[in-house]
Image: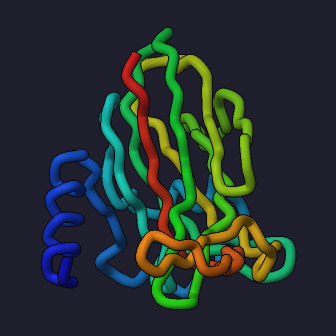
Amino acid sequence: MDLKSVLASLMVVAALTGCATASRTEAVSAKVFTTTSEAVAEVTPITSLQRGKGIDIKIETNSPSIKGKRVPNKFEVVDIIGKKGDAYTLIVASRCDCLGFRKYSIYPDASLLDQTGAPIGEVTSSSPKIRVLRGTFPKDGTFKLVVIADNTEEGKKVGEVDVYFRALSLFKIDETVHPTGRVEVNFEAQ
C-alpha cells in the first residue's frame, strides 16, 4: 500500500468517526494568566462540544498561557452546554505526536468550570495521558472545559511506541511529555 492510499484511508476514517479538530486561529496576547478562573474569563473558547460527540484539540505555541510550577503552561478552553441535574462524563486523552522518531504527548490537566469560574465535578486519572471528569451539572448554562498542557514533567516517559517493519516489531521508542500537542475530548452520551 503506497503513502497516498494510507493517507486517503486515514482521512476516510477521520471523517466517519465524527471527530473534528479545533485549534486557535489567532495568536493570544503574551499575557500569562495566574489563575484558571481569570484565564477562562478572558480567553475565547476555540469551539463548543455537544453531548455524544468528540473533538481533537490542538494546544500549540499560539495557545494562551497560564502560570505553572516552573514555567508557563499552554492551555485551551471549550464550551460545554449543560442542563441542571444531568450527569456528565468527559474523557480527555492525550494523543501521541508520532512523526518519525519524535514521540511526544502532553500531560493533560483538565477541569470543568461553572459560570463563576469555580470547578465542578471530580477528575480522575487512569494513566498520565488520560483524565476523566464526572459529575452533575448544578444548573442550566454554558460551562468551560479547560485543558492545560502541564509541562512540569517535560521529557518524562509516559509510554512506549512500537516501531514496525512488515508487521514485525523491531524496537520501542519512548513517548515523552511535551509542552504542546493534541488531546481528544469525548462528551459521552447519557
Residue drawn at the location 70% of the way across and 36% of the way down: 123
Of 109 and 80, nearer the camera is 109
Question: Which residue extends farthest top?
Answer: 85
- What is the x, y in percent for residue 24? 35, 73
Q: Quadrant of residue 40?
A: bottom right
> Residue 76 in the image: x percent, y percent?
49, 63
Is 126 in front, or is 132? 126
| Residue at x 20%, y 77% (from the top left corner) | 1
- Nearest the camera: 133 or 177? 177
**15 sits to left or right of 119:** left
Residue in view at x 52 percent, y 35 percent: 90
Q: Residue 14, image x and y in percent?
A: 23, 57
* Observer able to see residue 33: no
Q: Is residue 138 visible?
A: yes
In the visual, does 142 lie left or right of 145?
left
Residue 128 percent location from the top left of the image? 74, 55
